[in-house]
Amino acid sequence: MKVTKLFTVLAVLGCIACSKAQIQEYLNGASKMAVTPKAAAEDFMIAVIGDTQYYTENQGTNGQYIEQLHDQINWIREHRVDSNIVAVISVGDIIDDYDHTDLATQQQWMRASEAYAELENIPGLPDGIPYGVVAGNHDIDFSAPWGVSPYYDTHFGQHRFSGRSYYQEGYPEGTNENHYDFINTSSVNLMVVYLRWNRDQQQVTEAIDWAYQQIAAHPDRQAIVVTHYTVSDNKDVDIDGKSDWGLQEKDGISQAEQMYTRFRELPNFFLMLGGHVSGEGRRVDVYNGNMVHAMTVDYQGREYVPGLLRTIKFSPSNDRLDCQTFVPGSAPIDNLQSTFSLPWKRSYTMSRTNDYNNDGRSEPAFFQDGNWIIPGQPNQTFGDRPTDIPVPADYDGDGKTEVAIFREGTTYNRWIRPDAEDDVFGQPGDIPTPGDFNGNGQVDYAFFRPSKRTWYVRYNYMPSPRYVTQVYGAADDIPVPADYDGDGKVDYALFRPSTAEWFRFAIHRGQYGKPGDIPVPGDYNGDGITERSIYRPSTNEWYVDGIADPVIIGQTGDIPTPGDYNGDGKTDRAVYRPQTGELLFPNGQTISTGVINGVPLNLPYAISHHFFGGN
């Protein structure tokens, strides 16, 4: 692990201090385009309780007893206000032994019922803390036709929730085996849809159709879908580096994948939660620019400390989900599977670029003589060789841009990050083009080799990286990789400066612009899909494909600097003026970066180097 060196340069520090104040004023609403950051009170939290079967069994299996479930619920009660906990979600396998019809089984149901009753009896809350449970495979009698769960309906049926303001409807009519709730917060209105474990494909299809109708009928509510099994744990990943969709045993069907495939066209669908397999797993998928997270939360295995609870903090103004896993009264588990952050709706393939502090906004950043100059952060030195090329990106998928260097050597090139092992990948003359080429939410190391007209990508995921190559383009083309179709994957794409033609792998997009124009692709309308765009320095016009009229901004010598500077999910048109160090916007707003005669990192290296030189 390398140690990042902090340095102080008095002349620069004065400018940066000014920059911080001006940028904060800008973000706080000084300009017409600024979005005022929302108060922390508008953040809210959901608590997720994994499979409880060994707690309710109360036999000490893997060290788990009913008291540890009570501890989790007591923690939720105690921190309801200070953490703004708006709902509790249980992912199924409430009890362990459905197939036993003796007193021991009834006691398991009673222990579960008594534990969750603690969420119902909250002073000052007539409805208690909103919560829901879903039936897992251990809660269902599969000896009966189609599989039934009468004990689930006995203890957690409609009679238990009917009349509570958050509870809406169950399906089939008269049961609670599938149901949904409305959860209101000061910033976002949610709906949580619970769909039981099922082995009958007809019933699965009917329940999914019912849920689709409910989600579609409430487009003003962000939808969370809970089913007992969503994705595999983090040790079982597919070719794209994502946890696999959960597969129902004996039947070869994946309810979760069917749910995602059916619901993904609904723009208000954004999160799936489940359990079933002992472990933690997650994946992210994008369809038509809409990002959906899926997580598995199940701590019943012997490798886990008993009593673990997962919380998800939602921060709308920062476009961020913060997840923590902990035993009440103890510190969160310190690993990236248990405690982590994720971008909520926008990833690095969308408008969330050059966001170094994870607040959902781009920062104007610079790299000069090995020094990284980023507003709001201490200056740091990282990469001080003349051949070092800055390649900042979100390499770990947490929504935050990390500093990184592409170091050209005499024979091989290296990718270097402060907190990661160096990676030998590339040769002199290669053009770095990092991007999320496999759609797993993490930016991959990649480059274009003009001499061979070939792209090289190192997929960034465990347990081991995967390398791919693709011949595409001409030696004089400028690589402009981006997600041009909204599937969450960066496409191989090029801009031919001699003709202003755009090419995407296997697709000739045609001419957009004219020779001399600078390509500035971005998500200018906030739909999660990158648009072809150009900046015409001869007339200072900014054209976006699909928008009829250009925007005039800047003057001769200005550098286009696209980014989402106000956090509204759209790429903003902006230019940097080297002579003054100012960033200028179309509405006349300007902010000082404090950097004179620099080259901003907000313009991708391949474009910046071609038109403005330097590294």
Image (spheres, rainbow, N blue to C red):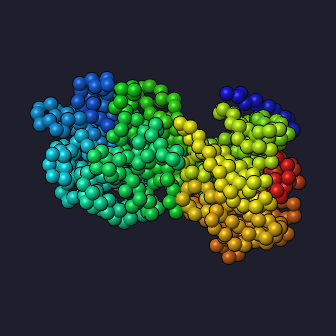
Q: Quadrant of residue 221 in the image? A: bottom left
Q: Left of 363 or right of it: where is 410?
A: right
Task: Say if residue 486 shows up in the picture.
Answer: yes
Q: Quadrant of the N terminus?
A: top right
Which residue occupies 73% across, 43% down?
Answer: 426
Q: Give the answer, above or below, for where 390 lies relative to 510.
A: above
Task: Residue 35: give x, y in percent of width and height.
Answer: 62, 56
Q: Residue furthest left?
A: 102
Please give the count of numbered marks on the rendered protein. 0
Which residue occupies 33% across, 43% down?
Answer: 91
Task: Say if residue 87 shows up in the picture.
Answer: no
Task: Residue 615: give x, y in percent of width and height.
Answer: 82, 47
Q: Give the answer, above or below, for where 261 lies relative to 445.
A: below
Q: Residue furthest bottom?
A: 548
Q: Left of 484 or right of it: where is 605?
A: right
Which residue occupies 29% across, 35% down?
Answer: 52
Task: Residue 187: give x, y in percent of width and height.
Answer: 48, 53
Q: Left of 432 or right of it: where is 464?
A: left
Which residue occupies 48% across, 30% down?
Answer: 332
250 or 124: nearer the eye? Answer: 250
Q: Give the answer, above or below, for where 550 lies relative to 51.
A: below
Task: Residue 38: give x, y in percent of width and height.
Answer: 56, 50
298 or 480: nearer the eye? Answer: 480
198 or 582: nearer the eye? Answer: 198
494 or 427: nearer the eye? Answer: 427
